[in-house]
Amino acid sequence: MLSYMQSILIFLPPSCIFLYFLYTKFSHPSSTPPQNQPPSPPRRPIIGNLHQLGASPHRALQSLSNRHGPVMLMHLGRVETLIISSANAAREAMKTHDLVFSSRPFQSITHKLLYGSKDIAFTPYGEYWRKVRSIGVLHLMSSHRVQLCRNVREEETSLLVQKIAQSCSSGPINLTDLFVLLMSDVICRVALGRKYSEEENWKSLEALLRDFMNLLGAYNIGDYIPWLAWMNKFNGLDARVEKVVKNMDDFLEVVVKEHKISKKFETENGLDFVDILLKIQRETDPTVDDETIKALILDMFSAGTDTAHTVLEWAMSELIKNPKKMERLQIEVRKFAKGNTECINEDDLTKMGYLKAVIKETLRLHAPVPLLIPRETTQDVKFMGYDIKSGTRVLVNAWAIGRDESLWDNAEDFEPERFVDDNNNNNNSIDFKGFDFELIPFGAGRRGCPGMSFAIAITELALAKLVHKFDFSLPDGLRGEDLDMTEAVAIIVHKSSPLIVDAITYNG
């Protein structure tokens, strides 16, 4: 038996190479490559450059771009992938050639999770995308709709403050868990009409949402080396996806049926997102089927819950690590909130320039999705002087652009002052809304995130209320510089360890 296994191990690699050669030779006839391609790191047979991505792809790609340039062509298995790591290249891709760069590549796991990519974020560019994007922008994520949800944000952030105040004397507080719960409650109320955290099955639903997000960013070898897709049956990935798809659909099916039975969507006021979508289905566009509704709701959870709580977690972590920045923010917030015995509200936030600078600086250093959702070119294009083929996958490294030393002084340091209007620098007018390509945590152009305003509104309010009501420190006498800032890498990058703090109520 041992000799047999040794023979397999000896002959398997060359056999795989031979089979791969036959597969590429006869199944996919090669075409003549463009004459002027971007520089490429050296690659290996079959896997190409996959081995160079490592455990933190955004960091690995930054390192490679420092050697090969801000525009690289990498071969991830059989997938030619354009890597963009500069503001100028991002501007050309998402502004000058935005239409050419506006599609999405097929990704088998997201395709299954999102009902055949019927959502906004991952669906390919075309008529269907224009329809669902219009629904999202006009009916779900408009400025008017964000304002209508204001009372939900203010109520839930006040509950967060109450929970922390009640726990102050009981020992250290897990802020990460509280942030996750806050965002889940807000999204559930706005999208589904009620909070599920108060129900018996909340833990199982929370675990399901966590599994969904983990799979959304899961690595699938079959997408890059198709003839190795069989491996997913043996490593359990296919089974995990099928389980999550079924359980999530069971949950959403109940949600949609409950809303249909209630017929609340027949009224005009107090509608949640499911009601609005059902109203569109009934009165405007019957092609918006139940699967589309479910996919759009999943977009809300994936874009709203994880992104917002991650930004809040990194912001609080950086402030605790930099106590002078925390002190400046507290002085500002407490100054504008003075005399307000209850709590600050969203009207107060417009006066808080340093608060907004803290959010910008957090997004610069810790872009929630460091490699923006992949794009795909729809036709051959001349890009930054290079010839790029139609069907090329495109990854924009927003994390690397945010730490580009040619754009930012002290690029690795947390310095909100760089965004303050009264500070004499070149960055104070830069914003994250998709017009300044030095800071694109939410993307830009046609495929920019439509939920940006919603995420920022809840993040700003929660952060302001926290620093208004509490003084924070690390437990067990740890200092700010001792705080673990290690990343846990997935499609959304959060801290690898929860943010545990001591909190003291401020009575000034």
Image (tube, rainbow, N blue to C red):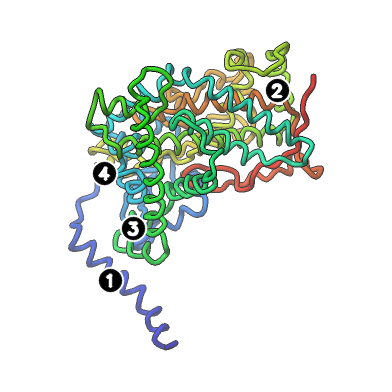
| Disc assigned to residue 500 | none
Question: Residue at the location (30% across, 39% down)?
Answer: 291
Q: Earlier in the sequence, mark 4 or mark 3?
A: 3
With respect to residue 265, does 242 lie above or below? below
Q: Is residue 444 left or right of residue 430?
A: left
- Quarter holding the C terminus is top right
In terms of depth relative to the viewer, which is nearer, 54 or 339?
Answer: 339
Q: Local crowd at mark 4 within 10 Å, few (<14), some, or many (≥20)? A: many
In terms of depth relative to the viewer, which is nearer, 329 or 504?
Answer: 504
According to the image, label 4 marks what residue? Answer: 391
Q: Are marks 1 and 2 in contact (CB under 8 Å)?
A: no
- Quarter holding the N terminus is bottom left
Q: Are marks 2 and 4 in contact (CB under 8 Å)?
A: no
Question: Label 3 is placed on what type of residue?
Answer: Gly
According to the image, label 3 marks what residue? Answer: 222
Label 2, label 4: how far apart the Cα atoms are: 50 Å
Question: Label 2 is placed on what type of residue?
Answer: His
Residue 128 horizontal/vertical position (percent): 25, 33
Q: SS of the residue at dot 3?
A: helix
Residue 48 horizontal/vertical position (percent): 37, 57
According to the image, label 2 marks what residue? Answer: 468
Q: How many marks?
A: 4
* Residue 471 visible in this rendered orientation of the protein: yes
According to the image, label 1 marks what residue? Answer: 18
The mark lying in front, picked from 3 and 1, is 3
Q: Earlier in the sequence, mark 3 or mark 1?
A: 1
Q: Earlier in the sequence, mark 2 or mark 3?
A: 3
Label 4, label 1: how far apart the Cα atoms are: 26 Å
Residue 339 horizontal/vertical position (percent): 73, 11
Question: Label 4 is placed on what type of residue?
Answer: Gly
The mark lying in front, picked from 2 and 3, is 2
With respect to residue 500, does 259 lie above or below? above
